[in-house]
Image (cartoon, rainbow, N blue to C red):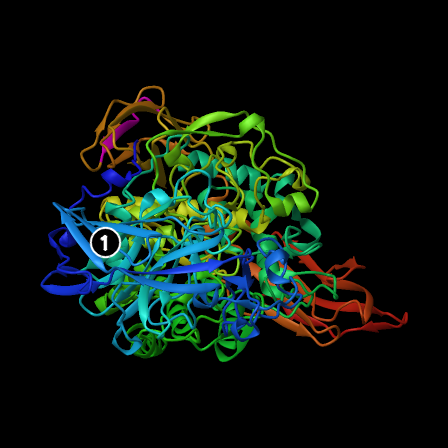
């Protein structure tokens, strides 16, 4: 696949609404007049030259924006009256991977973040004009500056300037002639990364090139979006964009406080700003007047100028191969699961801590992949963790402050939606989940960092309806969601105070709750919720990289046989990773379609591989017939890795992330990027979500599986499948069934999902490439036993050969779907049927013991068995050890002892029965206390 980077002379071949714009330059005083869709806009030929004799010491600093974590460019000033930057005070909790102490905790200085306060500033207005065919030459009072406008360029006129300084020093030349819109007249604005809707920057902040998902700022007046776009050649693909190599910056607020798109090149104190007298500096930009709103202008610029399209394919491995590799990795010791703490090590950020996202990820993997080991080693321990711990981040160190962990067992940390999912998946046989849901709905809780969540939200009401069928909850959800539409969606945000955001750090906080609005649309079929979800998804897409453009070329990576080394891990003493020097196509190395991690870590975590938004965006795009959203979803996920790729692209371009063995190293042997081990299972589950959603979309809903919601935290939202059967081209009650290595296909371009029902296996293949795939599909005989009467039938007209020795040939058209049923076979099912065979038993499944503040709950796990889980909220400041006494089915007493906090007990029960249990507790002073008895079970 080829995707080209436009050269300056080739940038303007595309046609759109703006291609019909007319450009007139009657005189220098009257400016550059652009007529688009019947409306005229004047771009004045005005530039601001900023000069500093000394280096202004450009540096990123934490901005003092209320409720927001974000770093902005600042400069040293010698005049205290210009030192208007107030650096945000950063507490001990704000630390770990992605947080750079060189930015956050350097000493306070006289600084400004206002571009107009940097150095000496002179505005130059053109005073002469000369037109030769389609080129208009502009003259200025100072012969340091010359400029011309290429009026015939498409889609936008190009303004090119040259600057030749008369004295040595640091320079920045800004184009300041774009139309200025007073804030009350603006319908929407955008400056990357955080200023969207009507949240205007409070000062003339400058976004450096490497932090611009597109190199422009924009203002929408209700008819046109106006902007000034740095031309693509000034944001090259190589080397990876960083602050030191950023050639320009972009701003939105002018000196009068109006919204006026501006480009400054070079950045004061940045790359190329130090100039000697007589040297020549050149720069080009495009003058944007687009008769569309901001999100559609963003799409247009991305597609027509930076070449974004459906540009990725599997190439290196199918997502199913990735899923197999990633799941195997999750069960290896390299994944650093701490059995004693029931969580994944989080030492990348918080030494000695563990962190989990959700029990639903491993539960889905265990069910869909028919994997009892995954259930026993990951899903069940994480369920206990999610029901007992106070926060997602758990640390036994009571002095630890980084990212605000908890050591208390004050659960459940599981969101209400997770309790709903657990309740539903296990046949609604555990009433204690309902009791927990009601308590969570009535209260509020801090689960992650210091973000407080209100329980009685429209989102939780919606999920309570899904659990109970009580239409009062649905009515409440609709009523509150309509208020949310009125107050949040239909009223553009002017400040960072959305109560649903919690904390402005991760990108979901900056948009509306489009993922949950999509769920409400699917529940009610009310289009206003879909429209709102589309709006939110399109704004979220503006956090995805669309620049730099991707060249049609090969890129040499890992020079000298060394993979890039992430500076943060170098500082932690990690060892260098080695991979052979090689060439790879640029498109495979591109961050286009990925997002930075968050506003607070965007300077260091450029493009993260955790793209949980992708399946949601794919589905929203399908419902709305919005191919841009669908292409963004695909770009974020397809053809990027063979195994867990770590977290992010951050230093140089490399193929290290693509390698199957990339994650198979001890923690200190990882140095290319950071590893958050609690992300492994969410990422594997995300792949299932993408696979199922992709088939749903391509089949136009003819392959559909019901889902539960995995809410997690931050941006880690996904659908969970496998808990209930679905439909495969009219065939109901098909169970999603995708055990490891179910089949092999000769082409990596085919992804697939599989289901089973009786003596049939259903298969749906999606071709991720733009070429026809003809390949052989071989079923694993250990999982699918065939007979002489077994056969393959197409369900959607795709071509398939005869089944011979468990294999058949098939053809899948470019970007298409092929659906088959293999009949007369025996699927070998080991675990799935047992765990999903719902129990009709209910009744007493929860109890409390006053001594130790103990909670006891009985898990009913279908035909797979039952578990008694008991934990103490009291910790080791009061108790030295705890002994659990319980009676078995025959009335015999059994004992278990725990001598280390957290005090908790798990008792596997082959069958459910009524049992009694009590505790003997040894105090710190050696005293012994025996609790009352409680009875639990049927």
Q: Does 682 sit left or right of 778 as displayed?
A: right
- Report the front residue among 793 and 570: 570
- Which quarter of the picture shows residue 62? bottom right
Provide the residue span drawn in magenta. 787-794
Rate crowding at label 1 as few (under 14), some (14 to 19) or many (20 or more) other CA atoms within 10 Å.
many
The N terminus lies in quadrant: top left
Viewer-closest of 583 and 718: 583
Taking the magenta stretch, the answer to whether it contains residue 245 is no
Is residue 790 covered in magenta? yes
Give the farthest residue toward the top: 805
Tell me if 131 is positioned left or right of 650 in this view: left
Q: Quadrant of the C terminus?
A: bottom right
Residue 358 x/y as whole percent: 53, 57
Single out the residue that lies furthest toward the left: 38
Compare residues 705 and 101 and report the one nearer the observer: 101
Taking the image as drawn, is residue 832 in sight? yes
Q: Is residue 661 left or right of residue 804?
A: right
Q: Tell me, yes or no, if residue 828 can be seen here.
A: no
Relative side of 257 to 78, left or right: left
Q: Residue furthest right?
A: 926
Q: Residue 560: x and y, percent?
A: 57, 26
Secondary structure of residue under mark 1: strand
Q: Position of residue 931 (x, y in %)?
A: 77, 73
Residue indicated by mark 1: 138
> Where does residue 618 sit, x and y in percent of width and height?
31, 51
């Amino acid at each position: 696949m080829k995707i080209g980077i436009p050269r300056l002379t080739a940038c303007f071949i595309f046609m759109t609404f703006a291609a019909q714009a007319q450009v007139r330059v009657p005189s220098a005083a009257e400016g550059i007049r652009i007529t688009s869709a019947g409306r005229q806009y004047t771009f004045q030929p005005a530039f601001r030259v900023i000069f500093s004799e000394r280096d202004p010491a450009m540096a990123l600093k934490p901005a003092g924006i209320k409720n927001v974590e974000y770093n902005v460019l600042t400069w040293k000033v010698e005049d205290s009256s210009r030192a208007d930057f107030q650096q945000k005070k950063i507490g001990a909790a704000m630390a770990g991977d992605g947080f750079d102490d060189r930015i956050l905790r350097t000493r306070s200085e006289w600084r400004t973040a206002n571009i107009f306060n940097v150095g000496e500033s002179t505005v130059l207005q053109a005073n002469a004009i000369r037109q030769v065919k389609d080129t208009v030459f502009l003259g200025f009072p100072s012969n340091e500056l010359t400029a011309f406008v290429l009026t015939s360029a498409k889609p936008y006129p190009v303004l090119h300037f040259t600057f030749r300084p008369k004295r040595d020093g640091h320079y920045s030349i800004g184009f300041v002639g774009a139309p200025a819109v007073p804030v009350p007249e603006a319908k929407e604005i955008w400056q990357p990364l955080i200023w969207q809707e009507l949240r205007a920057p409070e000062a003339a902040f400058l976004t450096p090139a490497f932090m611009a998902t597109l190199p422009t700022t924009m203002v929408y007046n209700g008819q046109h979006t106006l902007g000034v776009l740095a031309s693509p050649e000034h944001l090259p693909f190589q080397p990876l964009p960083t602050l030191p190599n950023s050639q320009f910056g972009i701003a939105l607020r002018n000196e009068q406080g109006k919204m006026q798109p501006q480009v400054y090149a070079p950045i004061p104190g940045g790359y190329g700003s130090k100039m000697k007298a007589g040297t020549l500096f050149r720069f080009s930009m495009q003058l944007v007047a687009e008769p569309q709103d901001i999100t559609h202008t963003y799409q247009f610029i991305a597609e027509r100028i930076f070449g974004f399209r459906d540009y990725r394919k599997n190439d290196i491995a199918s997502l199913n191969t990735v899923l197999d590799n990633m799941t195997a990795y999750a069960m290896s010791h390299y994944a650093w699961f701490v059995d004693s703490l029931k969580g994944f090590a989080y030492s990348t950020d918080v030494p000695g801590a563990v962190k989990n996202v959700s029990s639903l990820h491993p539960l889905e993997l265990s069910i869909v992949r028919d994997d009892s080991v995954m259930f026993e080693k990951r899903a069940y321990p994480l369920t206990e963790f999610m029901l007992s711990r106070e926060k997602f981040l758990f640390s036994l160190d009571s002095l630890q402050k980084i990212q605000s962990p908890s050591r208390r067992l004050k659960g459940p940390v599981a969101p209400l939606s997770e309790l709903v999912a657990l309740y539903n998946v296990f046949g609604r046989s555990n009433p204690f989940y309902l009791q927990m849901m009601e308590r969570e709905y009535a209260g509020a809780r801090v689960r992650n960092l210091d973000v407080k969540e209100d329980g009685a939200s429209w989102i939780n009401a919606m999920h309570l309806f899904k659990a109970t069928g009580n239409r009062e909850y649905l009515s409440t959800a609709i009523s509150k969601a309509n208020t949310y539409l009125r107050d949040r969606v239909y009223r553009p945000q002017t400040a960072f105070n959305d109560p649903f955001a919690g904390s402005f750090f991760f990108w979901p906080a900056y948009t509306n709750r489009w993922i949950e609005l999509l769920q409400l649309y699917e529940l009610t079929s009310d289009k206003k919720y879909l429209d709102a979800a589309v709006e939110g998804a399109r704004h979220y897409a503006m956090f995805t990289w669309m620049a730099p453009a991707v060249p049609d070329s090969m890129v040499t990576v890992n020079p000298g046989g060394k993979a890039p080394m992430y500076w943060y891990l170098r500082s932690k003493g990690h060892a260098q990773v080695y991979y052979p020097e090689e060439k790879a196509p640029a498109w495979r190395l591109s961050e286009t379609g990925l997002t930075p991690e968050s506003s607070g870590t965007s300077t260091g975590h450029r493009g993260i591989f955790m793209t949980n938004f992708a399946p949601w965006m794919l589905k929203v795009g399908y419902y709305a017939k919005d191919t841009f959203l669908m292409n963004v979803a695909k770009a974020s996920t397809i053809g990027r890795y063979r195994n867990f790729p770590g977290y992010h692209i951050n230093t140089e371009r490399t193929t290290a992330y693509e390698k199957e063995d990339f994650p198979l190293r001890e923690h200190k042997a990882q140095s290319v990027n950071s590893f958050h081990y609690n992300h492994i299972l969410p990422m594997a589950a995300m792949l299932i979500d993408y696979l199922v959603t992709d088939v749903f979309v391509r089949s136009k809903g003819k392959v559909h599986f019901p889902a539960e919601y995995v809410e997690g935290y931050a941006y880690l939202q996904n659908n969970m499948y496998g808990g209930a059967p679905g439909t495969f081209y009219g065939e109901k009650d098909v169970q999603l069934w995708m055990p490891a290595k179910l089949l092999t296909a000769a082409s990596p371009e085919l992804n697939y999902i599989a289901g089973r029902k009786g003596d049939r296996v259903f298969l749906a293949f999606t071709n991720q490439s733009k070429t026809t795939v003809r390949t052989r599909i071989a079923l694993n005989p250990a999982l699918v036993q065939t007979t002489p009467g077994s056969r393959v039938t197409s369900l959607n007209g795709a071509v398939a050969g005869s089944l011979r020795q468990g294999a058949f040939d098939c053809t899948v058209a470019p970007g298409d779907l092929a659906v088959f049923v293999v009949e007369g076979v025996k699927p070998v099912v080991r675990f799935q049927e047992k765990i999903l065979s719902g129990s009709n038993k209910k009744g007493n499944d929860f109890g409390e013991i006053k001594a130790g503040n103990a909670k006891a709950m009985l898990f009913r796990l279908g035909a797979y068995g039952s578990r008694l889980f008991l934990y103490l909220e009291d910790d080791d400041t009061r108790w030295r050890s705890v002994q659990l006494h319980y009676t078995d089915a025959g009335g015999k007493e059994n004992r278990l002892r725990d001598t280390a906090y957290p005090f908790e007990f798990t008792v596997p029960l082959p069958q459910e029965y009524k049992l009694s249990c009590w505790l003997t507790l040894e105090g710190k002073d050696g005293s012994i206390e025996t609790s009352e008895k409680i009875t639990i079970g049927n």
